[in-house]
Structure formats: structure tokens, C-alpha cells
């Protein structure tokens, strides 16, 4: 097959996947949540967490794009069920953030010293990468994009998936960079302004969780009808 056609397929798939997934992941919107969850960590730990969260987001989206359709079919799980479960998790995490008390500086230092590499590694996946950054909406979009990448010619299919996976890598990189410098971006707000902004972000995240939950319930009801 002509190289120019393969390059065109790669470019189209890259732009299509990036336009479908990146706005849903929306790293700037998740940055305040990352700052709130890592307020007990030092700068080096936050940088490591940001890198791991970006990597985990890329891995989750890659798995969803390549195997998501087959996994759901194997277990008999529909996308509306995924949205309902994911919406509950997001809403629960946002509710806890919304009512979390402010932590004193000495207690923050004590908690930071008690962290282990294993606990940081787990936290980088749950809840930071999934479901707060890469939730059911992003996973559903990745599965949908992956289902549209297949073509009658294997070379075109390979070019399509290469473009889609490249878009996922770019998304993971943007997540890592945004989270890495989230504290600097939010620093001009001041301590009081940051607290207010974080509470508002938690409320918005709660609304997003409820919206994801309601979308899944609505789809289930429509399927029953």
C-alpha cells in the first residue's frame, strides 16, 4: 500500500483519537484534585506521582482501545453498567473531598514521612489515574475509538491503531506535565483562594460523577424499554 495513504490514515486516526479522548480526560480540570490529594506529599513525591499517573492513564486507555470491546463481551458487561459503577466511584471520592477537613502542617509532615513507595504507587493508580483522571467517559471513548480503527486491509488497521495509540501517549504526557506543575499554576490563588477553588472543584467533580451515573441509568432504562 502507498506510504502516503498510510501516513494519511495515521494522521486521521491520531487527530480523531486525540479529539475524542483528550477533552474528556481534561488534565487542567483534574489538576486541583491532584493538588488536594497530594497536599501531604513533598515536591519529589508529587513529581513522581504525576509521572506515574500519566503513565497509568496511558496504560488504561491503551488497554481499553486494544481489548476493551472483547473484555466487555467476555464478561457480559455493557457500557452503561461501566458508567454506573464509575459514576458511583467518582461521586464518592468527590463527596469525601468536599467534606475533608483541613490538615495541619505538622500532621501533613507526619503523614508524608509515613508514606512508602508501595502506597504511593497504589495511590498513583487509584484513585488518581482511575477513576478521577481517566474515568468511565474516557474509557468508553477509547473503546469506541478502538472499535472504529479496524479496516479491511491490515496495513491500514495497523496505521490507524498506531495513530490512536500515539494520541493516547500524548494524552498521558499532558496529564503528567499538567499535574507536575499544578501547584505552581494554582499558587497565585493564595491559601484561602486555593481552599475555595479546591472545594468548588470537588463539587464540580461530584456533579460529573452524578452525571456519569445518571447517563448509565438512563441508557439501562432505555435498553429495558
Image (cartoon, rainbow, N blue to C red):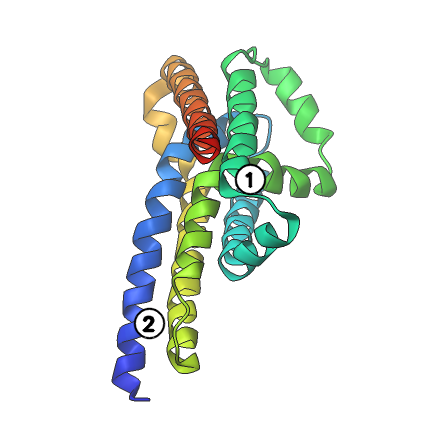
- Secondary structure, mark 2, is helix
Q: Is residue 71 above or below residue 2?
A: above
Find residue 10 and name its label. 2
**Mark nearer the N terminus (2 vs 1):** 2
Q: Is residue 53 above or below residue 215?
A: below
Nearer-the-camera pick, 22 or 45? 22
- Secondary structure, mark 1, is helix
Q: Residue furthest bottom?
A: 1
Nearer-the-camera pick, 117 or 18? 18
Q: Is residue 166 above or below residue 143?
A: below
Q: Which percent across, then down, holds residue 17?
A: 35, 57
| Location of residue 29 by image quarter | top left
| Location of residue 32 by image quarter | top left
Neighbour class for label 1 at 10 Å: few (<14), some, many (≥20)? many
Count every numbered label the image shows and give the total. 2
Residue indicated by mark 1: 130
Residue at 46%, 28% (x, y): give it.
221
Amino acid at each position: 500500500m502507498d506510504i502516503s495513504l498510510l501516513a494519511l490514515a495515521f494522521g486521521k486516526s491520531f487527530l480523531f483519537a486525540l479529539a475524542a479522548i483528550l477533552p474528556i480526560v481534561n488534565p487542567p480540570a483534574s489538576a486541583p484534585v491532584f493538588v488536594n490529594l497530594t497536599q501531604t506529599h513533598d515536591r519529589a513525591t508529587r513529581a513522581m506521582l504525576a509521572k506515574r499517573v500519566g503513565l497509568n492513564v496511558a496504560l488504561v486507555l491503551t488497554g481499553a482501545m486494544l481489548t476493551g470491546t472483547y473484555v466487555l463481551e467476555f464478561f457480559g458487561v455493557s457500557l452503561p453498567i461501566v458508567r454506573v459503577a464509575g459514576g458511583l466511584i467518582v461521586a464518592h471520592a468527590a463527596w469525601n473531598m468536599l467534606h475533608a477537613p483541613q490538615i495541619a502542617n505538622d500532621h501533613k509532615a507526619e503523614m508524608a514521612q509515613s508514606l512508602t513507595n508501595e502506597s504511593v504507587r497504589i495511590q498513583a493508580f487509584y484513585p488518581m489515574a482511575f477513576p478521577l483522571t481517566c474515568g468511565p467517559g474516557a474509557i468508553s471513548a477509547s473503546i469506541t475509538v478502538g472499535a472504529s480503527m479496524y479496516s479491511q486491509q491490515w496495513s491500514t488497521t495497523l496505521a490507524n491503531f498506531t495513530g490512536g495509540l500515539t494520541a493516547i501517549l500524548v494524552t498521558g504526557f499532558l496529564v503528567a506535565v499538567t499535574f507536575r506543575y499544578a501547584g505552581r499554576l494554582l499558587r497565585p490563588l493564595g491559601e484561602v483562594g486555593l481552599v475555595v477553588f479546591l472545594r468548588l472543584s470537588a463539587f464540580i467533580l461530584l456533579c460529573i460523577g452524578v452525571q456519569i451515573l445518571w447517563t448509565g441509568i438512563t441508557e439501562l432504562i432505555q435498553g429495558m424499554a
